[in-house]
Every structure is written in C-alpha cells, then in structure tokens.
Image (cartoon, helix red, strand yellow):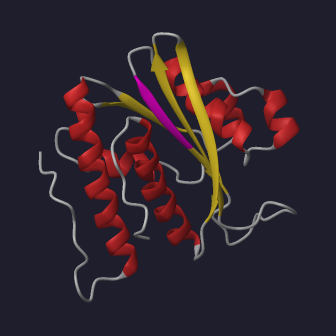
C-alpha cells in the first residue's frame, strides 16, 4: 500500500484536490490500522457514504474497514446504530450528542471493530436553523479499549456549497481518525 502523500496538481479543481487529499489520508489510515491489526467502521448522515467511499477507494481496504452505516434518517439512526430517540428529541440530529451516539453505535453493532467515526450535519443549501448554520457538521470518534468504549465529539462549520461541505467533512473525519489512533496529522492544509 502506498503511503506517499498526495501533492496538489496545478490546474486541478479544489474538489479534485480535496478528493486526492482524502485518498492520501485514507491510505495513511489503512496502513496504520493494518500495522495494529485493527478494524474500523463509520456512521454517516450528511456525508451519505462519502467517508466509506473514500476509505474503500484504497485497494485492500477490506483488511481494515469492517462496515459503514448510512443513517440519513432519524429512524435509521435509532434502528441501525442505537441512537436514543430522546437524544434526537432533545438535541436534534445535528448535535455532538447524536454524533457521539452514532460513533458508539458503530462499535456496539460491530464487536470486532476497534475505532469508528460519525458525521451528521447541514450540508445545505437549506436546512439551517437558529444556532445550526449551513456548513455545520458534528463528528463523533470512538475507540474500543480494555475498559470499554471512549469517545469524543467535535463540531466544525465549513464554508462552501453542499459538495464542498461534504468533501471537507470527509477530510476532517479521516484526520480525526488518524489523530484518534495517535498518528500525526498536518491540520494546516485545507
């Protein structure tokens, strides 16, 4: 598996740059997980499978990627990955509380997975509510350890149109997964 970082190509559109960046991060993540003998999973709402798609773009990803859940509706979040209806009622689908439960739910549904990431947000162009602007994405990261599952959530607001918000979310999630397992990440790049 190649771990050579992808470099910007002159004249390449920003979306293509972001896709190349995601592929490079996914390759690094896969190499790190293979070294550990670990598996991972995803739960996606606003990215609709793009995170799992970036991961499975890497040849050999079946060695370290167990499964991905696309839980776009609230009902899917509840039935597929055990998000509490109370959490959805109290905080909404786009919240750190929901993102945490989504990531934890992947590990609960996938006993042999070691880490998980989740995305839930407002990619736009509509859907904004007071306190939740277009571009707001909540991320959950979870890791299984000897003492159980530990998790954290983060929120970012990304600029751009729907495609740019979704692609930026994929890159952010991949960086977050690398950080979760202790791999250094350069956050200075877009």
Determine whether, in the image, residue 69 is placed left or right of residue 33: right
Q: Position of residue 175 (x, y in %)?
A: 41, 51
Q: Residue at x 40, y 23 (%)?
A: 114
Q: In which quarter of the image is the C terminus?
A: bottom left
User: Closer to the camera, 47 or 168?
Assistant: 168
Q: Quadrant of residue 82?
A: top right
Q: Which residue lies furthest to the left in this view?
A: 1
Examine the residues drawn in magenta and state their main secondary structure: strand
Q: Which residue lies furthest to the bottom in this view?
A: 11
Q: Where is residue 39 in the image (x, y as percent from the top left)?
A: 33, 26
Q: Where is residue 1 in the image (x, y as percent from the top left)?
A: 11, 45
Indicate whether 133 appears above or below 47: below
**One can see residue 5 in this view:** yes
Determine whether, in the image, residue 171 is placed left or right of residue 158: left
60 within the magenta span:
no
User: Closer to the camera, 141 or 90?
Assistant: 141
Q: Which residue is drawn at 66% across and 54% down?
A: 121
115 within the magenta span:
yes
**One can see residue 44 in this view:** no
Indicate whether 115 appears above or below 180: above
Q: What stretch is highlighted in magenta?
A: 114-118
Q: Residue furthest top?
A: 146
Q: Which residue is drawn at 34% across and 48% down?
A: 184
Q: Which residue is drawn at 52% across and 10% down?
A: 147
């Amino acid at each position: 598996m190649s771990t050579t970082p992808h470099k910007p190509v002159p004249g390449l559109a920003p979306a293509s740059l972001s896709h190349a960046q995601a592929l490079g991060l996914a390759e690094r993540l896969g190499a790190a997980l293979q070294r550990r003998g670990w598996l991972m999973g995803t739960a996606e709402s606003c990215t609709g499978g793009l995170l799992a798609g970036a991961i499975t773009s890497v040849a050999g990803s079946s060695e370290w990627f167990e499964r991905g859940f696309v839980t776009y509706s609230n009902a899917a979040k509840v039935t597929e990955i055990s998000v509490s209806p109370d959490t959805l009622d109290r905080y909404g689908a786009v919240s750190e509380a929901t993102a945490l439960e989504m990531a934890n739910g992947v590990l609960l549904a996938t006993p042999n997975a070691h880490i998980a990431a989740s995305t839930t947000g407002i990619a736009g162009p509509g859907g904004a509510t007071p306190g939740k602007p277009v571009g707001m994405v909540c991320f959950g990261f979870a890791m299984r350890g000897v003492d159980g599952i530990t998790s954290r959530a983060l929120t970012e607001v990304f600029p751009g149109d729907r495609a740019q918000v979704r692609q930026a979310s994929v890159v952010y999630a991949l960086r977050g997964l690398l950080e979760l397992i202790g791999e250094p990440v350069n956050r200075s790049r877009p």
